[in-house]
Amino acid sequence: MTISCNTQIINVKLIIRILKYVSGIWHYLKGDIYMNNPVLIVMAAGMGSRYGGLKQMDPVGTNGELIIDFSIYDAIEAGFQKVVFVIKKELEKDFRELIDKRPGRNIETIFAFQEITDLPEGYQVPKERAKPWGTCQAVMSCRDLIDGPFAVINADDFYGAEAFKSMYNFLIDVKDDEKYRYCMIGYDLENTLTENGHVARGVCKTTDNDFLKEIVERTKIMWRHGEIQFTEDEENWKTVEPGTSVSMNFWGFTKSFMDEMIEMFPHALDKIRKENPLKGEFFLPIAVDKLLKEEKATVKILRSHDKWYGVTYHEDKEGVVEALKKMKENGTYPEKLWK
């Protein structure tokens, strides 16, 4: 009897899924509450201001797939069974239609809404402010949906299958003890830049055994004169060495991080009100860095040497389309992700 290569691949993947399912039942029967399946949070509420539209909803695959289709496919293969999409309420109908007819048939999906008015008691939105309050607020919009470990990603970044496997394997076993135990997928800075302009990256300082010491959000970093440089004032540029680990907002947390963000939010809003009331934001790296400085948490860097793909600028799309096409051709992904 002849068995095709594709059939063998499908059978292997089916066996892996069965083993993961049996493993989950075993941990449940043991009563280990920390072995509950991690939840994936996808931050998809942002409008692509530089790209000029809803970049999360722009097809890049040969069969009309979005970048997020590839991420959810990788998440399912890694073991995730539930995903929460954080979106704007006004996009719910269109976004739900896109998700429900593709990845939504293969994984439990929930929608949460990032609202600019979702503020602690006593706080109000400044009269001329139009944008929500950043990635921390996006994750906090899921506070009533999360009761265990969770991962966070951007909707418009391609992370690669290995990153999801590393994240899932960390979260399935994670337990807080005398400190909170978190993790982050760390990418080499040079693998995360675009030739078409500047990007924002969380630049990391790490220990020799790959724990995060400090993370600083650089909102304007790019290739410049053959070097990687960033600026904070549009005039003075500083060089960053290749190989520096950066965050692409692929984080892994326990429930404790949600509680800590909620406690930090009023203080963050006070700072925003003083420094930049119309555009200031509460970023995930800000919250993580605060916990590190207070020695409340550790963050294990799970290193990835894969190349980042994303559509920060309209000109980025062609390269992303070509890269994903090649991944289908070499068997990294099936021709049709969803059947």
Image (cartoon, grey):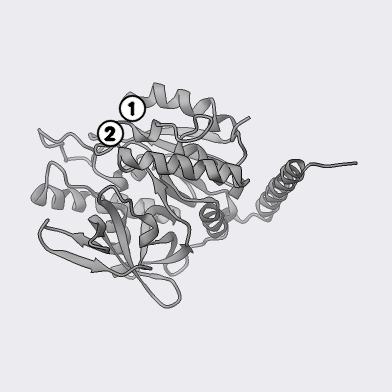
Q: Secondary structure at mark 2?
A: loop
**Callout 2 touching callout 1 (CB < 8 Å):** yes
- Asked if one can make out residue 166 in the rendered structure from this viewpoint, the answer is yes
233 relative to 100 in the view: left or right: left
In the displayed orientation, state which residue is furthest to the right: 1
Residue that numbered label 2 is attached to: 115
- Work out which quarter of the rendered image holds the N terminus and state it: top right
Q: Position of residue 53 (x, y in %)?
A: 30, 31
Q: Earlier in the sequence, mark 2 or mark 1?
A: 1
Q: Quadrant of residue 231?
A: bottom left
338 relative to 311 in the view: left or right: right
Amino acid carrying label 2: it is: Glu
| Residue drawn 52% across the image and 61% down it | 174
Tell me if mark 1 has few (under 14), some (14-19) or many (20+) residues whose alpha carbon lies within 10 angstroms of its own.
some
19 relative to 104 in the view: left or right: right
Pick the front one: 41 or 158 = 158
| Residue drawn 15% across the image and 58% down it | 232
Residue 35's disc number:
none
- Asked if one can make out residue 43 in the rendered structure from this viewpoint, the answer is no
- Work out which quarter of the rendered image holds the C terminus and state it: top right
Residue that numbered label 1 is attached to: 89
User: Spatial distance from mark 2 to mark 1, Cα to Cα?
Assistant: 8 Å
Pick the front one: 268 or 8 = 8
Q: Secondary structure at mark 1?
A: helix
Q: Position of residue 15 (x, y in %)?
A: 74, 47
